[in-house]
Amino acid sequence: MSDVAIRRVSPDQHDAVMHYFDLVAYADNPNWSRCFCMERLVDDYPSRTKEQNRASRSELLRSAKANGLVAYRLGRVVGWCHAAPKSELKSVPGEPASDVGAIVCFVVAPDQRRQGIATQLLDAAVEHLRSRGMKIAEAYPRAGDVEPSRWVWSQYVGPLSMYQKAGFEIAETHAGFCIVRLKL
């Protein structure tokens, strides 16, 4: 898909990314609209409000400390992927390691799904983690079948099949999810 450009998030994208989270990313799932991809960044996520998460995401974007990749098509944001060193994240399975990068979230615009954008974001996330000195990329997809009507609500971590096609291998299996890894 040559008309999609993937960029590492930066302060100059603040307004476009905030617009995406405010109005596009969760248009078909309002239950996620409070997230702003803060779940893996704060210890108190369950008790935080949408306004708190929005303010935190805005501050991260402006500070140039945000980890993430943004997909653009025709000049608009159509996808987001959160990929960061595992040691910088909260509530991820296993022990933090300075050389392990974690891919924890994908949000593709509802009208852009099933067009390969998440796969392009995954490829870019792997390269992003490699460029940051990570030796292993890790992710936590759901294991087992997901009822089709619930897919969009459960697959924000990315489907297992996408990781396997990219060369990730199942390292551990847990109740409801697995840990997949790719040596970089």
Image (cartoon, grey):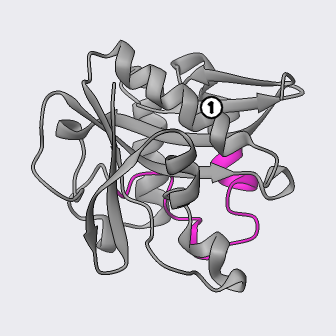
Where residue 179 sits: x, y (%)?
A: 31, 57
Q: Range of the magenta residues?
A: 20-39
Give the labeled residue for mark 1: 70
Where residue 167 sits: x, y (%)?
A: 47, 39
Rendered position, 125 above or below 163:
above
For the stretch drawn in magenta, the main secondary structure is: loop
Could you say which is closer to the camera, residue 145 or residue 40? Answer: 145
Quarter of the image where one finds residue 173? bottom left
**Lateral position of residue 124 relative to residue 22, left or right:** left
Which quadrant would the N terminus be assigned to in this image? top right
**Lateral position of residue 172 relative to residue 33, left or right:** left
Rendered position, 26 above or below 70:
below
Residue depicted at x 31% and y 65%: 45
Looking at the rendered structure, the secondary structure element under dot 1 is: strand
Q: Crowding at label 1, few (<14), some or many (≥20) Cα neighbours within 10 Å? A: many
Q: Amino acid at mark 1?
A: Val
* Residue 21 is a magenta residue: yes
Quarter of the image where one finds residue 149? bottom right
Where residue 102 sits: x, y (%)?
A: 33, 41
Could you say which is closer to the camera, residue 47 or residue 86? Answer: 86
Rendered position, 53 above or below 167:
below
Residue depicted at x 41% and y 37%: 83
